[in-house]
Amino acid sequence: MPDANWYSREARRALQRLLPRVAPVTGDDPVFIARAEQYFPTIFRLLYDLYGSHYDFFYWLEQILLSAAQMVADRPADLKALDRQREADPTWFQSEKMLGGVCYVDLFAGDLDGIRSKIPYFRELGLTYLHLMPLFLAPEGDNDGGYAVSDFRRVAPALGTMEQLADLARDFRAEGISLVLDFVFNHTSNEHEWARRALAGDEEFQNYYYMFEDRTLPDQYERTLREIFPEQAPGNFTYQPRIFKWVWTTFHRYQWDLNYSNPAVFNAMLNEMLFLANQGVEVLRLDAVAFIWKQMGTSCENLPQAHWIIRAFNALVKIAAPAMIFKSEAIVHPDAVMSYISPEEAPISYNPTLMALLWEAIATRDVKLLRHSMEKRFALPPGTAWVNYIRSHDDIGWTFADEDAAELWMNGFDHRQFLNRFYTGQFPGSFAKGVPFNFNPVTLDTRICGTAASLVGVEQALDVGNPTLLDHAIARLVLIYGVAISAGGIPLIYLGDEIATLNDYGYRNDPAKADDSRWAHRPRFDWVRAERRHDPTTVEGQVFQWLVYLVSLRQQNEAFGSGNTIFLDTGNTHVLGYICGGQVLALANFTERRQSVDRRALTGRIHLPDAAYDLVSRQDIPLAGEITLEPYRFVWLKIG
C-alpha cells in the first residue's frame, strides 16, 4: 500500500485536475473549493484503497466529486446557512437540550401532514430531534417494516410526497427539531429500479448487486456467514429464476445486498444520500453498517472496508452538506459498535450495550454487569455522543460482551438463556410480557419483542389488578428512562413509551405481519390514551409527567449533555451509580426493596459534601452516613 507522502502528493495532483472540471457546476464557489481542499485528501486515500485497482479509478473519482458539486449547487440557501452554523458548532448534538423521539409516520399520525399537526405534542415532550421510521416507497406486503426501499427519492404515496417532507423538515427547523431519517445503504428492495433493470438482463445493474451463476461461490461464503433471520429468511442467497442467478440477500429474499466493490454503487448511493440532505435531513441513521462489504472466508461483518466507505461518505458530506451527520446502527459486539464512532465516521451511535444491560439489570435486580460494562465501554472519543435508548422498532438482543460476563464469573450463554426465559414470562416470578423472536434451534439464540411498558410489568399488573405491582412497573419504566435521560449523550424515546403503550397482539391476525413478532411493539399510537397524559391518577399520566419532568431537569443542567460520565461501584450491587459532567451524582435502586449506599464506598472515587441537593426530589439529602433509596427510586445529587 502506498505511503502517506504518495497519497498526499497524488491527492493534490488529482484535485488540481478535477477542480476545473467541476467549476461549471459550482461556479468556482470559494466555499466548495475550501471544503474540497480540506477533505479531498481523505476522500482520495479512502477511495484509492477501495477502488484504486480499477482501470477507471480516476473516472469514478471525477464522477464522485461531480456528484458532490452538483448537490452543493442544488442545495437550498437556508440549508447552506445551517451548514455554516453547524460548521461553527460541530458538536451541537452534545447539548443537554437534546432529546430524541422515534415513530412510524402512519402509526403515529397517519401521514406527513399528520406529523406536522403533532408538532405541539413534540414540543410538549421537549423533543429536539425526531426520527421518522422508513417512509420511502417500498413493496406492498413484505417490506421489512419499510427497510426494503424501492426509491430513496419518493415517499410512500400513502404518507405524502418528497416536497411535503422537505416542507416538514423546514417546519421542524423553525421549532428547533432536527429531522432524522434512515439510510438503508446495505441493500435495496427487489422492486428498486436498479433491481428491475438487473432482472431485465442489464449487466450494468446486475453488477450493482452480488449475483452468481450457480451455488459454488454462495456455498463457500455460507461457511462463514451467520443467518440474521433464521426463521423468516434462512440462508443468505436467493435464486432468481428469471435470470438463472443467485443474489445475495443477507436479511430477506426481497432485500438485495448492494455491491460496494463496484464504484458505480458508491457514487449512486452518494447521490441518494446527498439528495436527502438537500431535503433538510440533519441526521442519517446508517442502517446495518456492519454488512456493507463482503470478503470470502470472513463473516462479512465489520470488515475494514466498511469503515472506509462510511468515512468516505462522511468526508463528501462535509463538502456538500456539513449540517448533516451520521448515526451508526451496529447491533454487534460492543467493541465493534464503538469502532464506527468518530467525528470522521459516525459522530453519534446507538448504545445497544446500555440498552440491553438496563433490561438485564431490571430482571436480575443486580447492576454489576451493567456497571462493569459501562466502566469499560461508555467513554467515547471527543466530538461524539451516544444515543441512549430503551427500545427501538427492532427486537432486543443480549449484546453484552461474553468477556465482560466472564470477568464477573458469569456464563454469557447461560445468562442469555435466563434473560430470554425471564422476558417471555417463562421464568418463575417474571413480570414481563415479552414475545420471542427468531429462535435459532442450532445456536439457541432468541431475541425479545415487546413495548417497554409490557416488558417492565405494566401489562401483567393491569391483567391481575394489583396496585403494588403496577406501582413497581411504572417505577421501573421511569427508572430506566431516567438513566437514559441523565447518563450523557442523546436520550431517545420510542414514542408511545411516554404513555405506557402495551403490546399489540393483533399482528398475529395479519398475514403480512404474522411471522414477525416485532409488530407486537409497533402498535398504532393511541391518541385517546394520550389524552390522559395530564391526569396523574392514570398510568398514562404518571409515566408522561415523570418523563417530561426528567427531561426538563436534563435541559436545565449542562452536566447531562457533556457526555463526560463516569460509572462507579457504589458498594451495593443493587444500586447503579454514575457521575455526570463532574457535577451530578446519580444513584438508582434497581430493586423493589429499599437499598442503602454507604458514603465510604463512594469517597474513594469522588469528593462528597455533607449534604447535596437532589434535583429529582428537590430536597437536600444528607450524605454524612448512608444514602437510602426507596424501591426503584433514584437521586440526581448536585455535588459540583
Image (tube, rainbow, N blue to C red):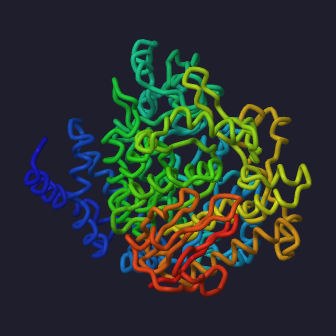
Choose between 218 and 431: the one closer to the eye. Answer: 431
Q: Which of 362 and 387 is in front in this view?
A: 362
Q: In which quarter of the image is the C terminus?
A: bottom left
Q: Which residue lies furthest to the right in this view?
A: 465
Indicate the position of residue 229 as horizontal and vertical percent values. 59, 30
Q: Quarter-wise, where is residue 92 in the image?
A: bottom left
Q: In this view, does 403 lie to the left or right of 150?
A: left
Considering depth in this image, is 219 or 142 the residue closer to the camera? Answer: 219
Using residue 162 as the reference point, say whether residue 577 is left or right of it. Answer: left
Q: Which residue is drawn at 54% across and 24% down?
A: 443
Residue found 68% across the figure and 36% down from its top: 421
> Quadrant of residue 316 in the image?
bottom left
Q: In which quarter of the image is residue 535?
A: bottom right
Residue at the spot 59% in from the left edge and 71% down from the top edge: 99
Whether residue 364 is visible here, answered yes or no, is yes
Residue 450: % across, % down:
72, 46
Above or below for 10 versus 404: below
Tell me where residue 483 appears, x and y as whole percent: 58, 65
